[in-house]
Image (spheres, rainbow, N blue to C red):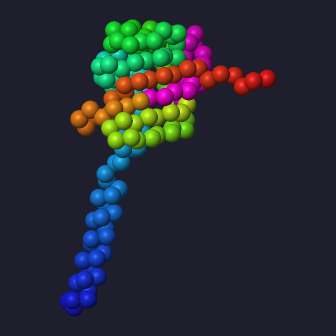
Amino acid sequence: MSSLTTMRAGCVLGIALLSLATSASAGPKDDITAASSAWAEALAAETPDKVMALYANDAVLWGTLSPKLRADREGMLDYFVGGFKALPNRKVAFGDQFIRIYGDTAINSGYYTFSYVKDGETKQLPARYSFTYIKSGDKWLIVDHHSSAMPQPPK
């Protein structure tokens, strides 16, 4: 094999390995998208402990279904347990997500739609949200969560 052929083979192999390494490592925005998806999955599973594990110990929640700010774990847990009853069999579908990363802090703002079944009828509740995440070890935890029903457009 000539040295030119060996160099070409080495370059091709190097480029292939580099492209695999680049696509295999998720960036912070992908991590935040995954953290938001994990939240939606835990909410749909009606598993309060899994939902709460996604929040930092000092997290604050302005929930869609309550006018009350939840600034402690007991209040947040109460909110989610009540929400499971109010919106049975709920699922969350994210719309546009606007993710910004600032070191070990990230903000994800956008809209999502809760769909749920009540009295045999599927209903939807569109809402807007902001999640603020902090990096704790290798996990992104929610430290601030605001969600409110989408207002009707002015007439």
Looking at the magenta stretch, what is its main secondary structure?
strand
Relative to 96, 1 lies left or right = left
Tell me which corner region of the image, top left, top right, bottom left or bottom right, holds residue 128: top right
* The C terminus: image quadrant: top right
Point out the residue furthest to the bottom here.
2
The answer to whether any part of residue 26 appears in the image is yes
Q: Identify the residue at horizontal 47%, vertical 17% (top origin).
A: 62
Point out the residue furthest to the front here.
102
Q: Position of residue 40 (x, y in %)?
A: 43, 28
Q: Identify the residue at horizontal 59%, vertical 20% (top origin).
A: 149
Residue 48 lies within the magenta run: no
Q: Where 96 sits versus 55, above or below? A: below
* The N terminus: image quadrant: bottom left
Tell me which corner region of the image, top left, top right, bottom left or bottom right, holds residue 95: top right
Q: Which residues are magenta?
A: 112-131
Q: Where 151 sits versus 18, above or below? A: above
Residue 129 lies within the magenta run: yes
Q: Position of residue 100 (x, y in %)?
A: 45, 41
Point out the residue furthest to the right here.
155
